[in-house]
Amino acid sequence: MRWNFTVPLLAALLLVGGCGKGNFSESANKGKENVFRYSIVVKPTSLDPAKVQDGDTIDLIQQVFEGLTAWSEENKPVPNLAESWDISPDGTTYTFHLKKNVKFHSGREVKAEDFKYSIERACDPKLQSATALTYLDDIIGVKDMVAGKANEVSGVKVVDDYTLEIKIDKPRAYFLGKLTYPVCFAVDKDLAKKGEEITTVDAMKSGTGPYIPESYQNEQLFVLAANKSYHGGAPAIDKIERPVIVDAPTRIAKFKSGDIDLTQLERQDIEAVKNDPKLKDELKYYARPAIWYVAFNLKMVPAFASKDVRKAIAMAINKERIVNDLLGGVNQVANGILPPGVDGARPDLKGIPYDPSAAKKLLETAGQYGKIPAIDMYFRAERPDIRIVVEAVQADLKQKLGITVNAKPLQWSAYLDRHNKKELPFFHMRWGADYLDPQNFLSLMLATDGAENKTYYSNPSFDALCAAADIEQDHDKRMQMYAKAEDIALDDVAWIPIYYQRDAELVSPRIKGMRESLFGHLPHTKVSLSQ
């Protein structure tokens, strides 16, 4: 790990070099180049849209690959490679009419059969996609193919070269939003082979997006070149450079010296940036429909099977101090599961109060005080703000409840691997909306059979409400059922919500035309750079 928690930000701002430089060429004439440079805080976890599942890498992937639908700046799924679609009266059959003359980076035209191939490639059990079931399982036949019981996805039919039919199991109001996820993107079958993960830049040149991968230098600098034949019109910039810069002070120094045009900020750095005369006007905030939470694995730690134990732990954690003091008040304390921006979010929820005395009494009543063995708490190693939260939880539980928590940092790819295998006993994690529907948080994350349930939480009443709400076509009834389900999960202390996310970034004034949605930066099809 290269995090340095003792280096004052003022010193960091004066740095010109440092660890995690990203290996990109440095020049005094950066402003005269038509190259958009912005840092990525970790190495990409995969180069394959069917495998990627983290936001940092998705931001890279979405420049190269595309799907039937995409997000608009109004946070709606809109036509992309499909120019239109029809939905059957019963809401279970989607007929997509593809945009003509869309070319893969190889120059071959995209046809309906390419989407069938891409979906079936993602569902091939040999590929071991962690996201295929999460985003494609509504399609008839997907579950069978992922399980190795079928050789094709029966619910995907090629009608003709420019018409694709997709049948889903039940009407689902959020289905078009799911299709915006990378696992649904089209790949060129000549380069992206079934059963083989895309691991090279050459194989990654299999998309239709506005940029074409050019190089990945020493796993420290990813370079994308503009796709001059892009179906939406050639991008205005010539290249995008994504230097991998893990060290937060170095990212800020590189921005201040003009070596990068955009960078993420850690929460503890924001106050100093706000007081810097050069940087304060370039600080931008972005509200995200995302929640950071603390979660329990109910099978790995026997004590966590007790609702009283979970509630006592929640009551012992001072969320207000974590969010407003330790992290600078940028984010919003979370009391519910659904973050602002998601349909059905309820900002007036009160949540479990911070009450250490009551927490201790609850543990004593449950016969667990002083009897819970040391617990390993896992977290993503590369981000100092995450460590701050974990260390605060660690201190609170030791001081208030006498519970020893061992902080266990893992590199992001290793963390994701263990998370996907449900091998984290106690952890701090983020979930950001893929589409602005409660299903993306409640049914997906906490239902017993939810594809992203990594904690073994299970409540039949919660499951029944979510199952009914998922297919209910009356909007108000859906929201009422999801609200009841959320109340159950909160009462059960399925998670401990910590905060709703608000990003802070430094953005150079030379960047023009940046498109945003609640989900993050949209593909850089309209970005230009002033000289």
Image (spheres, grey):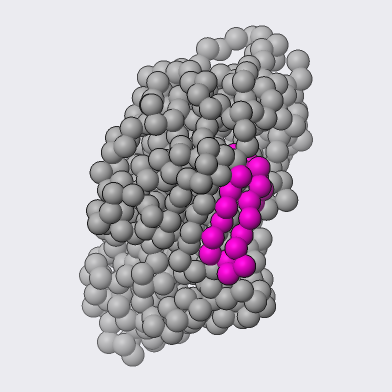
x 33%, y 32%: residue: 193
On whether residue 34 falls in the magenta region, the answer is no
Give the quadrant of residue 515: top right
Q: Which residues are magenta?
A: 77-97
In the picture, measured across the screen, residue 414 lies left or right of residue 58, that is left
In the picture, measured across the screen, residue 329 lies left or right of residue 528, that is left
On whether residue 78 falls in the magenta region, the answer is yes
x 71%, y 30%: residue: 526
**Residue sitting nearer the eye, 296 or 289:** 289
In the picture, measured across the screen, residue 218 lies left or right of residue 55, that is left
Please tell me whether the stretch drawn in magenta is mainly helix, strand or loop.
strand
Could you tell me if residue 25 is visible in this image? yes
Look at the image and tell me in which quarter the C terminus lies.
Answer: top right
Q: Tell me if residue 219 comes above or below residue 519 in the rendering.
A: above
Expressed as whole percent of the image width and height from the top left, the position of residue 301 reads 25, 70
**Residue sitting nearer the eye, 348 or 199:** 199
x 57%, y 80%: residue: 481
Could you tell me if residue 427 is visible in this image? no
Disc tally is 0
Look at the image and tell me in which quarter the N terminus lies.
Answer: top left
In the picture, measured across the screen, residue 37 lies left or right of residue 496, that is right
Expressed as whole percent of the image width and height from the top left, the position of residue 244 reads 46, 28
**Residue sitting nearer the eye, 230 or 30:** 230
Q: Tell me if residue 368 comes above or below residue 91 in the rendering.
A: below
**Residue sitting nearer the eye, 139 or 387:** 139
Expressed as whole percent of the image width and height from the top left, the position of residue 20 reads 44, 26
